Amino acid sequence: MNFGEGRWTLGALYGEAELRYDLPLELPLLGTVDFPLYETGAAGGVQLGYGFTDSLSVAFTLGYLDTDISIDSEFLSRLPEALRPDLNVELRRLTFDLKFDTRDDTFYPSGGIAASASLTHAAEVDSLFDRHIDIGDRDYIKTSASLSGYRAIGEDGVLAANASACAVGDDAPFFDQCGVGHSDSLRGFASLENLASHSLAAQVEYRGRLSPRWGYVAFVGGGAGGDSFSELSSDRGGAAAGLGLRFRLSRQFKLDYAAYWAMNDQGDHQLYLTLGQRF
């Protein structure tokens, strides 16, 4: 909702989800083991923003997350609810966002830049066994920044580039960590395989048109993660490249439905289906 001659914005969001995914963990003698997890939860937030100019804006967001994470096992699901080894996380977040945006189009920019910086303070309460045992309160700070640039090439082409950085405190839960393929828009890496407290990533792509409805993209990028920015390593990241095909759902708003295939330097393949641009 916009008011005050369009300077002020007010937004609210609430959602519930059930997720099944694998969390890779390094274990002594066993190497990397994928733990199948089942997560349920609800999240909501309220955001208030103000635009100083047409390109510069700030926003404050107050968010809340209540989620249960358990091992996705048929045997464990038969145990009494109080004995299941699940982890409940309640997370309260206050985020400050600063954005500078000179793009010529929101959905399909062909010129300008988009820069953003975010600072979040989060407070977390953990418990085990269906909230029967509290295991302490934690709080942490998370910061992130992103810079994207766009330039038209010929009549139908666009060259786009993006760089991003992320840093988070040690007490952050794994799903709020930084990491290549997790906290950035880099394709070619599983979301949870490179979790780290600090990460950097960069990518560039060429966007072309085959017809008014159909388009394509070719991209390459890379990133690194570590316990600090001085300890970044490609061992917790790497390089990736890929191709994508797009179908324009709306000619008026230049909104694309996209399918991407990507491969990283370890030989892993990823397939993505998305609405809109990656950055």
Image: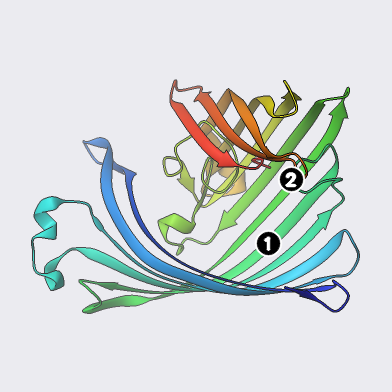
Q: Residue at x 64, y 40 (%)?
A: 278
Residue 225 shown left or right of residue 165 in the figure: left
Q: Residues within 10 Å of mark 2 (few under 14, many from 20)?
A: some
Residue 44 shown left or right of residue 166 in the figure: left
The label number, if any, that marks residue 118 in the structure image: 1
Hey, which residue is sitting farthest right in the picture? 53
Picture coordinates of residue 42 (x, y %)? 41, 69
Quarter that holds the C terminus:
top right
Q: Amino acid at mark 1?
A: Ser
Q: Amino acid at mark 2?
A: Phe
Q: Residue at x 76, y 33 (%)?
A: 160
Task: Tell which tag, 1 or 2, sits nearer the viewer.
Answer: 2
Picture coordinates of residue 176 (x, y %)? 48, 58
Residue that label 2 marks: 107
Instruction: Tell me where residue 233 sits by quadrant.
Output: top right
Q: Helix or strand or loop: what does disc 1 sit on? A: strand
Q: Can residue 261 be seen?
A: yes
Relative to residue 82, is residue 162 depicted above or below? above
Picture coordinates of residue 144 (x, y %)? 65, 55
Q: Can residue 235 be seen?
A: no
Picture coordinates of residue 30 (x, y %)? 22, 36
Relative to residue 151, is residue 15 depicted above or below? below
Label 1 – label 2 distance at C-alpha: 21 Å
Relative to residue 137, is residue 24 depicted above or below? above
Residue 256 vs residue 243, the one in the foreground = 256
Q: Residues within 10 Å of mark 1 (few under 14, many from 20)?
A: some
Mark 1 in CB contact with mark 2 (< 8 angstroms): no
Q: Helix or strand or loop: what does disc 2 sit on? A: loop
Residue 258 vs residue 120, the one in the foreground = 258
Residue 243 shown left or right of residue 117 in the figure: left
Quarter that holds the N terminus:
bottom right
